[in-house]
Amino acid sequence: MRMVDLIKKKRDGGELSKEEIYFIINGFTRGDIPDYQMSAFAMAVYYQGMTRAERVHLTMAMAESGEQVDLSAVEGIKVDKHSTGGVGDTTTLVLAPLVASLGVPVAKMSGRGLGHTGGTIDKLESVPGFRVEVDRERFVELVNKNKVAVVSQSGNLTPADKKFYSLRDVTATVDSIPLIASSIMSKKIAAGADVIVLDVKTGSGAFMKDLESARELARAMVEIGTEVGRKTMAVISDMSQPLGFAVGNALEVKEAIDTLKGEGPEDLYELCLILGSHMVYLANKAESPAEAREKLKESVKTGRAVETFKRFLAAQGGDASVVDEPSKLPAAKYVINVEAEQDGVVSSIMAENIGTAAMLLGAGRAAKDAGIDLAVGLVLQKKIGDAVKKGEPLVTIHSNREDVEDVVKLIRSSYTISSGSVKKPTLIYDEIQVLGG
Ligand code: URA
Ligand code: CA
């Protein structure tokens, strides 16, 4: 087999066999296939797409390129969730303990944030003492004991994807649906869960800006998961504005605690109930998603959800007293309001810019190995559809630097205030399942 022939075959619209796709991925991972050929291949896929069978082979070739986590020692049906990334998306922090409180095992590996999107691992590190580095044996032990553990990705998971993604990043081939779907699913499959619930975001703060491409990505991922025997479904949710109010690490932990107590933002709670109800249902702990939803609400009401969160924090070395005393979380030196300059109704918020504003304060990383400030971030006081009067706060800045003129400017330019009434955006656009799932 020669790589040049396979590039040509894809370029001309042919379908690659399983053997050919494994040849490409294994050769590239080993270093036998050079970057220039792999770049040409990525561009051919960008223009020609991939069939359903090709996507499955690509996903599995990447999933099998490194370690595959063996969760067989965890009792029960293991569930995982994945979000395609957004601004102030606090769902994992809420969902992991919430779903676990019903006895569903959540064995979650998470990443750190990059750019305008935050990472669950960073957020958890704002709880004093919390350890994210946990070896495999202990990870399984924790899940068996508490039904939940969230640890940082370690070991040699999907090296093929890591290498290919870096190459796509510099060859303008990231935004190809078959490549994105295979990339995400290879990581989820290697991480070992039986059930995968995907939260595909759409809107100004999302990777997929429009609904049709979000739907297409969701369908592609659900097809792959189902085909390889994982129960997979996707929810398409709104990211035309940040989720909840808080954007920033410790601020989002506080927001997650509020939500687990039933006192959080409505949109965040609702999305967690929807995603959680599918996780619980697919793990066979309820007869229907509707029944699962009632059980989840009950768990919040009785305090079982927040107790599970405390146990989870303590089990990984974290100070669980932050749940009752959030003032123990890192706090910023300066708290500054950005006030509205006119009366009206908020008609749009550029979510990505809000994420960037939080990053400028130090809440996110501009580069991969940059440090972050866990205390800083933003709290939205007004969201789309809210009426506002001149001088009222739109956003509260939590900062460790006194001069925040750049951040204020960016926030002001992200908000559009109009006259007349504005409808609140739909939170959930669609749910995607495929036959056999
Ligand atoms: N996120 C991923 O993990 N992979 C992609 O290809 C794009 C976004
Ligand atoms: Ca939030």
Image (cartoon, rainbow, N blue to C red):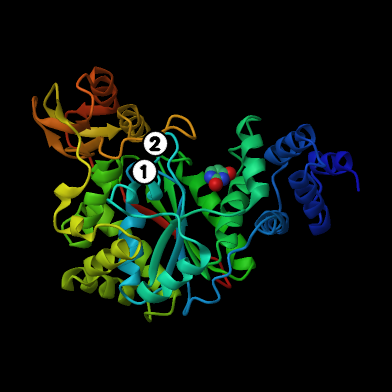
Element type at mark 1: loop
**Is any atom of residue 192 visible in this view?**
yes
Determine the residue positioned at 68% across, 57% down. Answer: 52
| Ligand 1 placement by image quarter | top right
How crowded pointer 2 is (Cα within 10 Å; few <14, some 14-19, many 20+) is rated as many
In front of the other: 300 or 231: 300
User: Label 2 sits on what residue type?
Assistant: Ser
Q: Which residue is mark 1?
A: 239
369 lies left or right of 269: right
In the rendered image, which quarter contains the C terminus? Answer: bottom right
Figure quadrant of residue 320: bottom left
Residue 53 in the image: state x and y as whole percent.
72, 59
Can you name the residue that lies furthest to the right here?
1
User: Could you give the CA–CA distance between mark 1 and mark 2, rounded to whole angstroms?
Assistant: 6 Å
Question: Do callouts 1 and 2 mark residues in contact (Cβ within 8 Å)?
Answer: yes
In percent of width and height, residue 96 lies at 36, 63
In the figure, 132 relative to 71: above or below?
A: above
Relative placement, left or right, of 50 versus 74 is right
